[in-house]
Image (cartoon, rainbow, N blue to C red):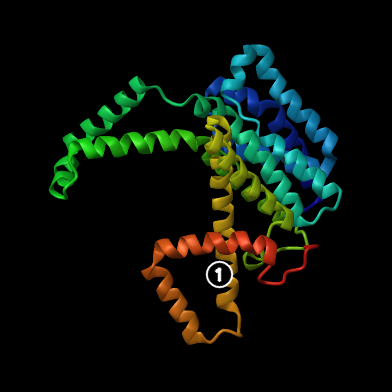
Amino acid sequence: MYVKDEVAVSYLAGAVLLTFPWLGVIWGTWGIIWEVILLLAVFLLGRRNGLIIAAVCLFIGYAIPSLGFGVSAFNQMTLVPFAGLLGVWGWQKHWPVRVTFFWGAALAAILGAIPVISFAAQGIDSKTLGNMVNAIIQQYQTSGLLKVLKQQGIDEVQFRDSLQQFIQVFVLIMPGLEAIVAIAEFGVVFSLVRRWFRDEDHIAFTHWRLPWYSVWGVILGIALYLLGDQFSWTVMRGIGINIMVVYAALALMLGISVYIYLLKSPKIPRILKWAIIIASFLYFFLSVVSLIMFGLFDLVFNFRHLPEKM
């Protein structure tokens, strides 16, 4: 990239950080794409011009709509782009790639979950739940799907109970789902920026791994869930469940990485590899659970014997 191109990218990234939060509130277009653009701008400006300049531009960008619209502006904005500052900090301190990603993704998950935590903690009232269930059942009746369910032995009462349970569970794990989306955003931008700057320590998917101490997050989630269930502390139980939901998604990706690594290993006979692949499709649900467990235990046992300093 030519020097003039680098200067132009820096100015463009700074302009994005200063104006996009305000435009997102004005136009009502804030969403995943908006967060990805702001994250990308934070990384580009931070890596070219330093963490302080990127932080100042981002804070000013968020302050402008808050001064114009008050606290209501934060009802539309999310704080996920601020996780990019931690990513820039890790790059400046020469942290290992997996360490920078883990802490940046953890901060992105927390910031992404904040807007829906209060909603999930309050739960959904019976009236709203009933209206949602009635609307779904009406759609099923109109499309004829309810008649199909009855032919399969599922009556309306059973279907209504299942819908209520599903909606309640969905509301409970909403913070975890938002956290997963935020982690995905951070991960995509993190990978793009590393390719943009042509970092030499490129890590293939089969070598993805989190720091060993990240397993403590799983332990924390299980502990909070068990304590909350034991003493009927709903909030603590909900936090534990959401932490486990996030780690289930991360462990699944790590498990797939381990799985592909083993399939590429020349030490495993080809016929055994094909047997594993076929069994994975035949017992899909069991395979998904196994991949999650592989991903979790890989944090501790490092099945691929990858160096910790990567």
The local crowd at label 1, few if under 14, some if 14 to 19, many if 20 or more residues have their Cα within 10 Å, is: some
The location of residue 207, given as percent across then percent down, is 67, 66
Q: Which secondary structure lies at badge 1?
A: helix
* Image quadrant containing the C terminus: bottom right
Residue 297 in which image quadrant: bottom right
Residue under circle 1?
A: 259
Asked if residue 116 lies left or right of residue 7, the reply is left
The location of residue 59, given as percent across then percent down, is 75, 26
Residue extending farthest front: 230
Q: Residue at x 41, y 61 (%)?
A: 285
Res. 4 visible in picture: no
Of the pair 42 and 304, the residue shown nearer to us: 304
Q: Is residue 80 above or below residue 284?
A: above
Q: Residue at x 63, y 15 (%)?
A: 71
Of the pair 38 and 276, the residue shown nearer to us: 276
Q: Is residue 17 above or below residue 210?
A: above
Q: Residue at x 70, y 50 (%)?
A: 102
The location of residue 73, given as percent across then percent down, is 60, 18
What residue type is disc 1 on?
A: Tyr
Of the pair 85 and 174, the residue shown nearer to us: 174
